[in-house]
Image (cartoon, rainbow, N blue to C red):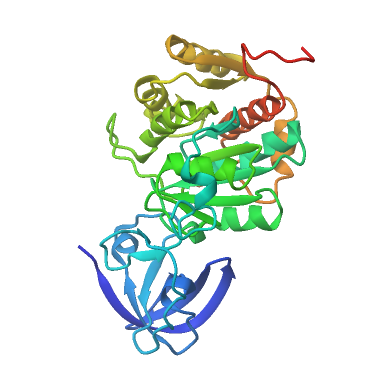
């Protein structure tokens, strides 16, 4: 099931938090590889490395890397003791981390009986590529909002795989990160989506949370066989814990696959079938026939959710000014503008909820 290769590092390339790119000579063929120093140690030129090339050989996976499994001739030192939360469990590369909800964690007391998100808005999106667009919408509407990113395990498991997150942290567009389920590498680790959300709010003091899977969405062309089905389950978790779920629709006018044009079947299935609790489903107010088609496609979601139309004026400029270049499925902001405007509109709507009490809650100033 794993395609193994043995090679020698010839060049160390760019790096970002938690990851480093390499050029590795496998036989006579140079291969682009990625190493996670916290897992395998820090490679240098001349190191022999063991590689997993399974996804690379199949042409799969965001980035197109061979992955460094080990530096067999120069193993890293044992990590410090602490934590018993195992992620990527019972695989050869399982890793042990300190969970925020771990009994040994300094956060455990804050989480032991935590059961409430206190109406905190949580933007739920299908693809990782929505993250910077959501944030652009948040900051356009409410600068300086304290945003925490919760990454699920539907895509990449190591958060370090995301250059986007590294750049957003550097630009202070994210105050902190939490990795949940089998995903790992966040500022805080959590066992489930539920404890990840509770950590974001009760430990990290998030005013707003964004929840998506990591890079590398998995789909099979079937109604139910896609990793983004987690979006519907996330809505249930947010609402169960007393948060305010804001559902970001996956929309495209440029995707060559009919099932993803207009509102993607991923969104219609996740929010229309899997999400059993009501959310604010944000429909961007797009122009022309395409905008009409999107609004019509969202109509069935009104049976279960609050469908909210949000204007997109000004969001394009906000996204152009983002600290990372926006891209989804190889398409840029200008090539798939509707996709990014939908995500940014969800961020704009969520930001407007931060200081607004939920419906039915009395306010002295109302």
Percent x, y of residue 203:
59, 47
The residue located at (54%, 20%) in the rendering is 280
Q: Is residue 23 above or below residue 244?
A: below
Q: Report whether 148 appears left or right of 55.
A: right
The residue located at (39%, 32%) in the rendering is 233
The residue located at (75%, 29%) in the rendering is 314
Q: Is residue 82 above or below residue 45?
A: above
Q: Report whether 170 appears left or right of 194.
A: right
Percent x, y of residue 156:
41, 53
Q: Quadrant of residue 137?
A: top right
Q: Is residue 121 visible?
A: yes
Task: Quadrant for the N terminus, please.
Answer: bottom left
Q: Is residue 27 above or below residue 343?
A: below
Q: Quadrant of residue 228?
A: top left
Front-lying residue, 103 or 348: 103
Q: Is residue 366 above or below residue 265?
A: above
Q: Is residue 331 visible?
A: no
Front-lying residue, 274 or 80: 80
Percent x, y of residue 304:
43, 13
Residue lying farthest right?
A: 365
Front-lying residue, 84 or 161: 84
Q: How many marks?
A: 0
Q: Report whether 287 appears left or right of 156.
A: right
């Amino acid at each position: 099931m794993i395609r193994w290769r043995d090679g020698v590092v010839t060049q160390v390339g760019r790096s970002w938090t938690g990851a480093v790119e390499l050029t590795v000579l496998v036989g006579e063929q140079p291969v682009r590889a990625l190493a996670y120093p916290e897992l395998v140690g820090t490679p240098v030129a001349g190191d022999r490395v063991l590689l997993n090339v399974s996804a690379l050989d199949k042409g799969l996976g965001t980035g197109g890397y061979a992955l460094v499994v080990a530096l067999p001739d120069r193993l890293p030192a044992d990590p410090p003791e602490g934590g018993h939360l195992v992620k990527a469990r019972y695989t050869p590369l399982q890793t042990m981390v300190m969970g925020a909800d771990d009994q040994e964690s300094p956060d455990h007391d804050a989480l032991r009986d935590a059961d409430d998100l206190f109406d905190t808005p949580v933007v739920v999106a299908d693809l990782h590529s929505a993250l910077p667009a959501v944030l652009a919408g948040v900051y356009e509407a409410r600068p300086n909002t304290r945003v925490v990113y919760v990454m699920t395990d539907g895509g990449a498991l190591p958060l370090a795989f995301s250059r986007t997150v590294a750049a957003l942290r550097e630009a202070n567009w994210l105050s902190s990160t939490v990795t949940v389920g089998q995903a790992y590498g966040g500022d805080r680790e959590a066992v489930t989506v539920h404890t990840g959300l509770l950590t974001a709010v009760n430990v990290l003091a998030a005013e707003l949370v964004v929840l998506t899977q990591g890079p590398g969405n998995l789909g099979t062309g079937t109604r139910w066989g896609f990793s983004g089905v987690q979006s519907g389950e996330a809505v249930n978790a947010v609402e169960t814990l007393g948060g305010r779920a804001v559902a970001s629709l996956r929309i495209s006018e440029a995707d060559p696959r009919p099932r993803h044009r207009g509102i993607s079947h991923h969104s219609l299935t996740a929010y229309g079938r899997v999400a059993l609790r009501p959310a604010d489903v944000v429909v961007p107010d797009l122009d022309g026939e395409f905008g009409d088609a999107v609004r019509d496609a969202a109509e069935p979601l009104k049976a279960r959710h609050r469908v909210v139309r949000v204007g997109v004026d000004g969001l394009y400029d906000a996204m152009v000014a983002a600290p990372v270049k926006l891209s989804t499925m190889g398409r840029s902001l200008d090539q798939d503008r509707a996709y990014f405007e939908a995500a940014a509109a969800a961020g704009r709507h969520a930001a407007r909820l931060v200081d607004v009490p939920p419906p039915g809650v009395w306010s002295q100033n109302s």
